[in-house]
Image (cartoon, coloured by chain):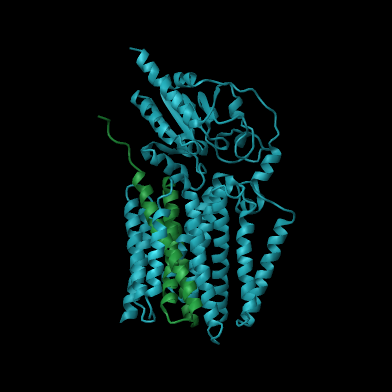
Chain colours: A green, B cyan
């Protein structure tokens, strides 16, 4: 890994951190629970590394550990997105005057 | 060519994740945010499957199917259990990151030159954060589910032990950098990380759970960042950084809402201190019946309802929604004042009320409600305690002194529904209950609200 690569990753990290800060600061307090379940799904992005490791030609132990990691991440992706949507569906505005 | 296509997928995924969080900021666009998140994740997975290094898809497919099968029921838990589910998800996330870090280390251990200083440090951080999040989140889930006692567990020299272990961890990393093939140091690191997670949660009381869950969320994100540094994958770095800052902001908000510092939450053992301070003077309650409460509400023109976790525990949300309907139909203005730390995780109370079909525009934040409090005729406190305790404003000796509260005591009158005469979660007496214009209705929140409802409807009937 070259020094330039390390620096470029650090740049990406810093910028992404600031973007995250600015975007999430604006999330209404009303939606903090859905926000947490959405980010729990997004942080399952670790699935990317797990898939690579599980699919490459490695020994059984490595493949097993990686497959468990894929399964755990996929659980988070599926349950995280589904429950976020389930919660958001419940947030409704006041209806007009009742009939 | 394929390499470019993969990076293109990752670029799209990164953009979609930012949009997902941006759209989530408002209820009208929030569901679009979930869609963007799903699309981003699909692009990320699709891009990854294109890697030419992947030669065997069998285990990937098995794991993806297994994850889906476990994930679907986990998304259908009752909404009171959402904090536990979130903690469990953080544990799974930590496990995945920790396992990948361990597997990578074991592969590279035999390949001289792969474990550069930078990579070794990144792997060490990845494994530390991953396994720490695993055990920490499992402990948190246990406390939230009340499988593990919720009271803080402390022991002598707690912080000394933690710092000593931290020193050993740093020492192991240094030794590992000098000779990456020495797997014993790596094993020590894993064991310490698992221990840290447990030690982190042991001294945390139930009232601090929202902060800690948010903090663990931040760790899970940062663990993904570390994984990105190890694998030189910018998608992991960006997505992890988004989650890391999200968790960090939320824990800051929670700390601010309780007027506590980060270090105080982590090292303070909140509940313990408060139990010690609980023995105060007792005042005299004014006890009332549900009929009295109904009469007061009926004659009000402005009502503020302060829901606490006690309401959720007795599953009174739907009765409260009925009460809201009955009162608004009579032209009474009803608002809900939701304290930032109401519930067991950030924003939890809002979700519970939304589930009961309460429109979100009648849910108001503390800062909106407080200035109007003197004009409010009746404040109805349902199963909330510390968030309406005036001691936070007046009593410098109180453990919650300085915590922003909902000024229920400044309203013209207050009705407090409380399960028992015992002090609340934090073990502090609440002066609000002894005030002249406060009426106490003791009983289960659901039954009391039902009682008020019948009284209101009964009078409606007899009036004709």
Is residue B136 shown above or below B353?
Answer: below
Q: Nearer the viewer, residue B176 or B432?
A: B176
Asked if residue B80 shows in the view, the reply is yes
Q: Residue furthest bottom?
A: B112
Q: Seen in the image, is B218 located left or right of residue B3?
A: right
Quarter of the figure with the C terminus of chain B: top left
Q: Residue furthest left?
A: A99
Q: Residue furthest right?
A: B156
Q: Seen in the image, is B228 located left or right of residue B362?
A: right
Is residue A35 shown above or below B376?
Answer: below
Residue at the image point whose x is 42% and y is 61% from the top: A75
Where residue B401 appears, x then y in whole percent? 63, 39
Q: Nearer the viewer, residue A66 or B9?
A: A66
Asked if residue A16 shows in the view, the reply is no
Quarter of the figure with the N terminus of chain B: bottom left
- Residue B72: which quarter of the image? bottom left
Residue at the image point whose x is 42% and y is 53% from the top: A35
Where residue B114 appears, x then y in whole percent? 53, 84
- Residue B43: which quarter of the image? bottom left
Residue at the image point whose x is 47% and y is 25% from the top: B378
Q: Seen in the image, is B332 located left or right of residue B292?
A: left
Residue at the image point whose x is 46% and y is 26% from the top: B376
Where residue A79 appears, x then y in whole percent? 40, 56
């Amino acid at each position: 890994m070259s020094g330039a690569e390390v620096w470029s990753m650090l740049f990406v990290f810093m910028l992404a951190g600031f973007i995250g800060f600015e975007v999430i600061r604006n999330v209404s307090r009303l939606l903090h629970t859905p926000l947490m379940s959405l980010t729990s799904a997004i942080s399952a992005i670790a699935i990317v590394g797990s898939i690579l490791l599980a699919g490459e030609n490695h020994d059984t132990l490595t493949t097993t550990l990686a497959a468990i990691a894929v399964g755990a991440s996929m659980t988070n992706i599926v349950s995280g997105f589904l429950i976020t949507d389930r919660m958001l569906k419940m947030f409704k505005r006041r209806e007009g005057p009742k009939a | 060519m394929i390499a470019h296509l993969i990076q293109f997928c990752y670029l799209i995924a990164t953009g979609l994740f930012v949009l997902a969080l941006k759209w989530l900021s408002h209820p009208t666009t929030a569901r679009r945010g979930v869609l963007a998140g799903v699309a981003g994740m699909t692009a990320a997975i699709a891009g990854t499957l294109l890697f030419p290094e992947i030669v065997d898809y069998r285990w990937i497919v098995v794991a993806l199917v297994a994850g889906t099968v476990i994930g679907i029921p986990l998304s259908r838990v009752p909404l009171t259990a959402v904090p536990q589910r979130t903690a469990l998800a953080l544990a799974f996330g930590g496990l995945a990151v920790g396992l990948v870090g361990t597997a990578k280390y074991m592969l590279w251990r035999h390949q001289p030159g792969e474990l550069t200083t930078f990579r070794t440090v990144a792997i060490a951080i990845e494994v530390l954060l991953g396994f720490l999040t695993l055990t920490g989140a499992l402990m948190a889930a246990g406390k939230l589910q009340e499988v593990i006692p919720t009271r803080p567990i402390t022991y002598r020299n707690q912080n000394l032990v933690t710092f000593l272990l931290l020193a050993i961890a740093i020492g192991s990393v240094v030794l590992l950098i000098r000779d990456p093939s020495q797997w014993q140091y790596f094993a020590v690191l894993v064991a310490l990380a698992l221990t840290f997670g447990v030690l982190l949660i042991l001294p945390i009381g139930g009232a601090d759970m929202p902060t800690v869950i948010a903090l663990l969320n931040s760790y899970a994100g940062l663990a993904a960042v570390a994984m990105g540094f190890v694998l030189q994958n910018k998608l992991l770095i960006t997505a992890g950084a988004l989650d890391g800052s999200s968790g960090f902001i939320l824990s800051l908000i929670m700390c601010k809402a309780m007027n506590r510092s980060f270090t105080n939450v982590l090292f303070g053992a909140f509940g313990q201190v408060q139990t010690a301070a609980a023995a105060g003077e007792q005042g005299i309650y004014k006890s009332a019946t549900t009929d009295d409460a109904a009469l007061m509400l009926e004659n009000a023109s402005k009502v503020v309802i302060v829901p606490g976790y006690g309401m959720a525990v007795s599953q009174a949300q739907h009765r409260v929604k009925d009460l809201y309907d009955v009162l608004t139909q009579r032209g009474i203005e009803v608002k809900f004042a939701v304290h930032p730390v109401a519930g067991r995780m950030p924003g939890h109370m809002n979700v519970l009320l939304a589930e009961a079909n309460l429109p979100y525009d009648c849910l108001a934040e503390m800062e909106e409600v407080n200035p109007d409090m003197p004009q409010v005729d009746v404040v109805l406190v349902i199963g909330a305690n510390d968030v309406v305790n005036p001691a936070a404003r007046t009593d410098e000796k109180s453990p919650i002194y300085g915590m922003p509260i909902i000024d229920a005591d400044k309203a013209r009158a207050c009705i407090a529904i409380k399960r028992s005469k015992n002090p609340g979660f934090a073990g502090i007496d609440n002066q609000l209950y002894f005030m002249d214009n406060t009426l106490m209705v003791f009983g289960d929140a659901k039954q009391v609200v039902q009682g008020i409802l019948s009284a209101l409807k009964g009078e409606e009937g007899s009036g004709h």
